[in-house]
Amino acid sequence: MSAQDQEDVYFSTNPPPRHLEAHAAQARAFIDAHAAAGRRVVLVTSGGTTVPLEKQTVRFIDNFSAGTRGATSAEYFLEAGYAVIFLHREFSLTPYARHFSHATTGGFLDFLEVGQGGGVSARPDVSTKMVEILSRYHTARTENLLLSIPFVTIGDYLHELRAISRLMASLGPRGLLYLAAAVSDFFVPPERMAEHKIQSTDLGKRAQEAAAAAAGQDLNSADSSKQDSEEEEFDNFDSSPRVPRSKRLIIDLDPVPKLLLNLVDGWAPRGMVSSFKLETDPTILVTKARYSLERYQHHLVIGNLLATRKWEVVFVSPGREDNWLRVKRRGREWSEEDVKRLRQGEVPKEEPGEEIERFIIPAVKELHDQHIKANK
Ligand code: PMT
């Protein structure tokens, strides 16, 4: 099937999110305003996508991403003069609020106290930081530089991504797509998705079967044929289960079409497209990043390992040497041995001394400068 056919099938069979039109209208107004002002616009995608198992969703598959990369990057893009469309997983980290909303030491209420006059004020030890971040946030909001659009499911994400990318096309090379969301590779297609909560007991299943029989439906008629994944195959099928099949929940997932190709070729063909490549095995990171670049023919892949993603990333782009960016260590320099260990996925004991996005965004901007010059 061609990439266009795959796109058509996916979008015609997977319903759009409820607010797609409203979000597209907001994005259009935002892009038009900044295009008129000659400002660059970046679409930052952030956070994980869910894979619902039921139409009336009680259960879903999710991934680890908290949206740190996306939310932090959005702040640095604003600092670098970009207007930012922040397409993010609902309730994941957001720019500026992230400094207070998801602290491991407590919730945002722990940063506040009731003053003598009865009003609320920031705790004295965080007040300077809060004022500084609040003022950056207010500037972004009052100058209309930050548009936040939420998604939840993989389907929502792909519909929103297509709609906004198409609008970004009007910016030509001045549009930048920075795809940092952790996008699910597998999903349950609507025709195989249960309508109601999947039952775990025989009683529940029998009640559902009786209700279906009364309505003249066959609950077992779903097509469970599998498509081959384009990626490497991994089989965890249990051929001698200790628990009978009838009591187990076996989830049969289809591959999500790789729509990056459609984005690069059709949705935003003149913009700069940079994607992230996540791996856990250090020995394949660069090869997979380069493979992704060749496959999708876009402009930049930023490779990162799950364990060390806050410490180091690698820029892989056409015609250039791989460029490793690394944060400083607290109170000591990197030795050659340290770097080797980091590259093998070994995480230093202390927290990083700074945010790696401080280095990622200027380096992306430099490539975007070149992209704009080359495509004038
Ligand atoms: O949120 P944090 O905790 O800070 O973590 C940040 C991060 C690790 C999630 C981020 O830095 C990152 O690596 N994001 C990309 C994760 C990912 O989806 O990697 P991937 O190798 O599965 O996909 C690579 C690219 O293919 C992505 O740009 C994605 O948009 C694209 N893709 C993926 C699936 C799919 N069906 N179609 C696609 O086009």
Image: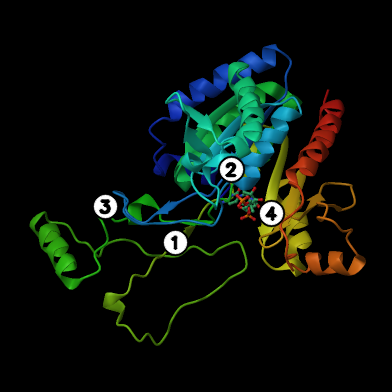
Q: Are the residues at dot 4 and dot 1 in contact (C-beta closer than 8 Å)?
A: no
Q: Which residue position holds label 3?
A: 195
Q: Are the residues at dot 2 and dot 3 in contact (C-beta closer than 8 Å)?
A: no
How busy is the neighbourhood of tag 2: few (under 14 within 10 Å), some, or many (20 plus)?
Answer: many
Q: Can the viewer see residue 234?
A: yes
Q: Are the residues at dot 3 and dot 1 in contact (C-beta closer than 8 Å)?
A: no
Sequence-first disc among 4 and 1: 1
Sequence-first disc among 2 and 4: 2
Name the foreground residue: 256 vs 80: 80
Q: Which residue position holds label 2?
A: 46
Sequence-first disc among 3 and 1: 3
Label 4 or label 1, whichever lies nearer to me, is 4
Relative to residue 220, is residue 64 drawn left or right?
A: right
Task: Say which residue appears at 74% left-offset and 48% top-offset.
Answer: 301
Q: Secondary structure at mark 4?
A: strand
Relative to residue 329, is residue 99 drawn left or right?
A: left
Label 2 CB less than 8 angstroms from ligand 1: yes
